[in-house]
Image (cartoon, coloured by chain):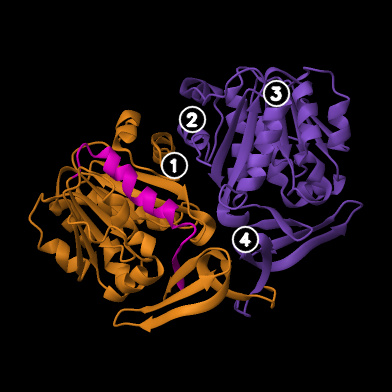
Chain colours: A purple, B orange
Amino acid sequence: MLPANEKWFSEVHKDAGSAWSLAVETRLAHETTDYQTIEIYKTRDWGNLMVIDGFVMLTTRDNFLYHEMLTHPALFSHPAPKRVLIIGGGDCGTLSEVLKHRSVEQCTQVEIDEMVTRLAEKHFPELCERNDDPRAELLFDDGLAHIKQLDPGSMDLIIVDSTDPIGPAEGLFGPGFVVDCYRALADGGILVQQSESPLLHKDLIAGIRENMTKAGFTDIKTLGFPQPCYPSGWWSATQARKNATIEAAEPQRFVASGIQTRYFNPDVHRGALATQL
Amino acid sequence: MLPANEKWFSEVHKDAGSAWSLAVETRLAHETTDYQTIEIYKTRDWGNLMVIDGFVMLTTRDNFLYHEMLTHPALFSHPAPKRVLIIGGGDCGTLSEVLKHRSVEQCTQVEIDEMVTRLAEKHFPELCERNDDPRAELLFDDGLAHIKQLDPGSMDLIIVDSTDPIGPAEGLFGPGFVVDCYRALADGGILVQQSESPLLHKDLIAGIRENMTKAGFTDIKTLGFPQPCYPSGWWSATQARKNATIEAAEPQRFVASGIQTRYFNPDVHRGALATQL
């Protein structure tokens, strides 16, 4: 039993037999769109909390871990990423980290539900500070359709910053989408897919990796990192590179970039690449 | 609200405004000793669960992370650890990992509460399989007193595998104990202290590091790692070395050791050493 002197938001991880709860003070927003139900809570100790269809998406306090690890490892593994595509990522935290890289000439975010971004602008403004960057393009469209109409070889990085593989994001975990990503990537390009927990979702990770192998990617790595607000607190991103291997960031390049991080650095990158499955 | 169709064990992290819950089937043991109250539950999906005074100590499913990261980094940073002392650690998981190292000639575990070990033998037998190793010595005594009567310079490693810094373990986080550890360690010796969450307990970690500096240790590192069953799911061990620096494991030595791990490896070690505070 959780103590009744606090209000709690709880996410139950049904298949894992566990649950995570945050003490909340008020609900700041509650919107039902064509795609999903989005809630924003003010928590007691974690800043604001975004919930979609009952699942925790992010909190102010700990989202830096996920957003740094979904982006910087891939951006530093690629020699000069210029054209970046984000599928999902409506809270704009991934976009914000990508735009820290001076090599990036264009970063397009394709989020299906505009309301996610409108609520992030209001309740997670620190993640949206770079939305006016001239290199940023915010589209509100279906990522599955968007990827099909891209020119072959036109992208250096594709980052799939999706919700769980149920509901609107289900297709983003299917083999057809991965084939479309492969086609859209240039040689040396990298696909990054959020891939759930290395402790709880081994089968899902194996399926993602199998799709990547079948699509033709030559090197595949699953990078683990802590992420308190997601089931088990241990999360992962799986990367696949087209016709090249995935290497950890060069320390000199990281220092020269001037990019400030709270979790990512070249040694953490190397450790994440060595995650055992 | 957690769904009423399951029985839940919940640990509320009061200062963090969060809680973690596991679906449990039955309570297997409930013992009150001179020191604390110990419970063992059978969970639905995490194997067995040990709880002391309401705080989660370990589960069958995820304890490998903590036990590997409290031991192997220090054992591989030391050139040839022979004499190892564990303070606390009554579940014997730390002892079990230490004894995987062939260089170790003696490993003494000083647990204040014998009941912890008796319950571990019954409900976590896989952690106790090496308790009959002739190099293992299990004492049930006060770690604070034990350390004072050691010969100066007689230990290569001291691993403090304690409960939280309240109750019986409070003294293990005090400056006097760290001074006693420094005295008991040989040159090049390493003190390892479980040091809570890098996200939630920054002040505690700073205090541990300050005690180590004041005691005379010349290199201090805080290693982060995922640990689902502890608050935030992101945990740490802080190491301090006497008159030497702390370096990551050499890959050749790790391979030659033949030690099988599920999380630790030399690159993960290097990543953990680069944890930003």
Q: Of helix, strand and loop, which one carries label 1?
A: loop
Q: CA distance from mark 2 to mark 1?
A: 11 Å
Q: Label 2, secondary structure: give it.
A: helix
Q: Position of residue A115 (x, y in %)?
A: 85, 49
Q: Which mark is in front, 2 or 4? A: 4
Secondary structure of the residue carrying tag 4 is helix
Q: Earlier in the sequence, mark 4 or mark 3?
A: 4
Residue at the spot x=77%, y=62% of the render? A28
- The reply, left or right, for residue B176 in relation to residue A167 is left
* Amino acid beneath label 4: Ala
* Residue A216 marker: 3
Q: Are marks 1 and 4 in contact (CB under 8 Å)?
A: no
Q: Chain of mark 4?
A: A
Distance from the alpha carbon under mark 1 to that under mark 4: 28 Å
Q: Label 1, on which residue?
A: B275
What residue is drawn where x is 62% and y is 60%?
A16
Q: CA distance from mark 4 to mark 3?
A: 32 Å
The span from disc 3 to disc 2 (Cα, nearest Å) is 28 Å
**Which residue in the rendered view is the most extreme toward the right?**
A34
Q: Secondary structure at mark 3?
A: loop
Q: Which mark is residue A16?
A: 4
Which mark identifies residue A266?
Answer: 2
Is B66 part of what is drawn in magenta?
Answer: yes
Q: Chain of mark 1?
A: B
Foreground mark, 3 or 2? 3
The region drawn magenta spans B54-81
Q: Nearer the viewer, residue A61 or B23?
A: B23
Locate residue A2, reporting x and y percent: 60, 76
Q: Earlier in the sequence, mark 2 or mark 4?
A: 4
Q: The N terminus of chain A appears in which quarter of the rendering?
A: bottom right
